Amino acid sequence: MEKASVRAGVIRWAVLAAAVLVLVALDQWTKVLALRHLAGHTSVDVIPGWIRLTYVENRGAAFGIFQGRSFILGIFSTIAAILIIWLYGRIPVGKDTVLARICLILILAGAIGNQLDRLIRTFVVDMIEFYLFSFPVFNVADMMIVIGGILMFVLAFFFPKQLESMIGNKEKKTADKPDAASEAAPEGAREAEIQEAGDDSSHG
């Protein structure tokens, strides 16, 4: 039983590490391409009238908010990453909690992707722009954070039990599990009854 539990824990953290690594690598790859092919050039249409690629150096948070506050954003991102990892560790392994784990993986990968930019380049590389309507230029990491957040709202409304598993599952299991004293009590009562029956027969 203990070996199975250890194995499940190892698999859980291996999945988190592998998924985050792949997603962060994808985000950084798109940013390297933007630095090589978009920096210093005019915008490139992807879907004319809808989406274009525009190189922007973002010194704020996602979608250009909190400009010039990289240090504060770095602290916030680190705290958020630790919180997400802690929540991920509380989710039980199973098919019914897959969506909850995906949400946290996406948000964590997006936060790490943008934080790497701040550490390496002192700014975040943005390149995706919707120009059909006014919207800040963003990147793949921003998309991961937004998609993860949207999925979290979906969980809250349609699958609340998956969110409950992050905050109350372990406590519930502990409460439901009978303690050793309560399990031992019936055994002690049965032994007492057997001994009393034996005493009565000897007296008879």
Image (cartoon, grey):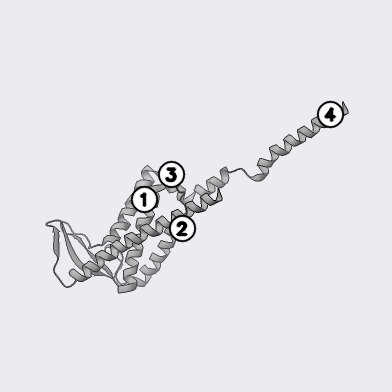
- In primary-sequence order, the first of circles 3 and 2 is 2
Return the residue nearer the eye: 46 or 137: 46
**What residue sits 75% from the left and 36% below the top?**
191
Label for residue 161?
3
- In primary-sequence order, the first of circles 1 and 4 is 1
- In primary-sequence order, the first of circles 2 and 4 is 2
Calculate the distance from the C-alpha at mark 4 to the C-alpha at mark 3: 55 Å
Indicate whether 139 appears above or below 100. below
Residue type at tag 3: Lys
Residue indicated by mark 1: 152
Q: Position of residue 183 (x, y in %)?
A: 66, 41
Calculate the distance from the C-alpha at mark 2 to the C-alpha at mark 4: 60 Å
Residue type at tag 1: Met
Calculate the distance from the C-alpha at mark 1 to the C-alpha at mark 4: 66 Å
Q: Secondary structure at mark 3?
A: helix
Q: In the current view of this chain or complex, which residue is farthest to the top?
A: 204
Q: Contact, CB < 8 Å: mark 3 with mark 1?
A: no
Label for residue 200?
4
Q: How many marks?
A: 4
Residue indicated by mark 2: 86
- In primary-sequence order, the first of circles 3 and 1 is 1
How packed mark 1 is, by other alpha carbons closer than 10 Å (few <14, some 14-19, many 20 or more), is many
Residue type at tag 4: Asp
